[in-house]
Image (tube, helix red, strand yellow):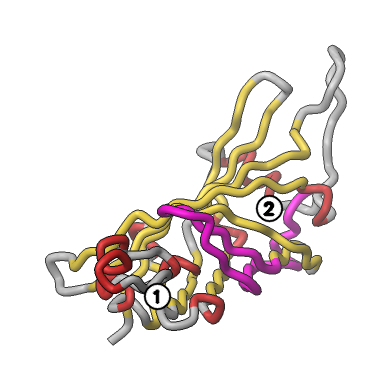
C-alpha cells in the first residue's frame, strides 16, 4: 500500500527536497500479518429495497508488504473461509452458503491479490487487485485510509487501515434473486465491502 508516499512537510521545507519520505513512516517498512482478532471484513447488501443487511467473515488470513523506499512494490493478500460468513441469522447464513449463492462446498475460499497501490493525498490511498469468488477472478479497487501505527502493550508493532469498495455481485456469478410484488428485487446487485484492518509487523 502506498502509505509511504506521504511527505514530511517540515523535512521537505528544511531540505528543499520534494517527496521526502518521513523517517517515522519509512520505519514501518516490512512484512505484516493481518490480525483476525482485531480486523473486520464486512459487507452490506440492500434487502427488499428498503433496508440494509450487514454481514462479516470470521475466518481469514492475510499479509501486507509495506515498502517505504518504493511504494509501488507494496502488496496485500487476503484469503477468506466462506463458511465463516455471519449475518446474525442462521437460516440466512445457510442460504448464503448454499448453491444459490457461494456454493461453499465447491468453492470454500474467496481470495484477493493486489496488483497496484497508489497514494491519493493525505491519509488516503487506493489498492487494486484481483478478487476471486466462485472461481471467477475480476478486478477490485479498495479505497483506504491509513489510521496510523502503534506498539501495543505486548510489544507488537501495528498498522491500521480502514477500507471500502463497491461491487456488483453478478460480476462474479452471484445472480440468485426473487422479484418483489411492488417491483424490484429481494437482494441488491450492488454490495458494499468494508475493511477495518489491524496488522502486526513480523520480527
Q: Which residue is mark 1?
A: 33
Horizontal side of residue 21 vs 194, given as left or right: left
Identify the element where label 2 is drawn.
Answer: helix
Residue 60: give x, y in percent of width and height.
Answer: 50, 66
Mark nearer the viewer, 1 or 2: 1
Label 2 neighbourhood size at 10 Å, few (<14), some (14-19), many (20+)?
some
Q: Is residue 138 magenta?
A: no
Segment colored magenta: 101-130
Identify the element where label 1 is drawn.
Answer: strand
Along the line of sight, the residue nearer the viewer: 14 or 112: 14
Residue 78: give x, y in percent of width and height.
Answer: 55, 69
Q: Is residue 121 magenta?
A: yes
Along the line of sight, the residue nearer the viewer: 19 or 117: 19
Majority secondary structure of the magenta segment?
A: strand
Please tell me whether residue 73 is drawn above or below residue 44 in the rendered image. Answer: below
Q: Residue at x 29, y 64 (%)?
A: 13
Along the line of sight, the residue nearer the viewer: 146 or 166: 146
Along the line of sight, the residue nearer the viewer: 3 or 130: 3
Q: Quadrant of residue 55?
A: top right
Residue 109: give x, y in percent of width and height.
Answer: 65, 68
Residue 102: give x, y in percent of width and height.
Answer: 73, 55
Q: Which residue is mark 2?
A: 97
Q: Residue at x 69, y 59 (%)?
A: 140
Badge number at residue 49: none
Which numbered disc flags the more N-terminal residue, 1 or 2? Answer: 1
Please tell me whether residue 23 is drawn above or below residue 138 in the rendered image. Answer: below
Amino acid at each position: 500500500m502506498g502509505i509511504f508516499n506521504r511527505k514530511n512537510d517540515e523535512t521537505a521545507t528544511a531540505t528543499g527536497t520534494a517527496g521526502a519520505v518521513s523517517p517515522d513512516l519509512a520505519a514501518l517498512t516490512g512484512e505484516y500479518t493481518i490480525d483476525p482478532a482485531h480486523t473486520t471484513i464486512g459487507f452490506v447488501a440492500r434487502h427488499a429495497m428498503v433496508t440494509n443487511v450487514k454481514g462479516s467473515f470470521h475466518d481469514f488470513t492475510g499479509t501486507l508488504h509495506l515498502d517505504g523506499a518504493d511504494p509501488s512494490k507494496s502488496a496485500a493478500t487476503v484469503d477468506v473461509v466462506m463458511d465463516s460468513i455471519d449475518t446474525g441469522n442462521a437460516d440466512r447464513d445457510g442460504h448464503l452458503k448454499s448453491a444459490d449463492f457461494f456454493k461453499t462446498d465447491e468453492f470454500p475460499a474467496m481470495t484477493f491479490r493486489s496488483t497496484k497501490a497508489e497514494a491519493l493525498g493525505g491519509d488516503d490511498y487506493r489498492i487494486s487487485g484481483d478478487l476471486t469468488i466462485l472461481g471467477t477472478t475480476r478486478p477490485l479497487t479498495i479505497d483506504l485510509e491509513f489510521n496510523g501505527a502503534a506498539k501495543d502493550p505486548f510489544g507488537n508493532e501495528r498498522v491500521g487501515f480502514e477500507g471500502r469498495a463497491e461491487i456488483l455481485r453478478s460480476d462474479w456469478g452471484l445472480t440468485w434473486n426473487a422479484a418483489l410484488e411492488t417491483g424490484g428485487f429481494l437482494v441488491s446487485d450492488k454490495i458494499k465491502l468494508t475493511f477495518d484492518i489491524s496488522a502486526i509487523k513480523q520480527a
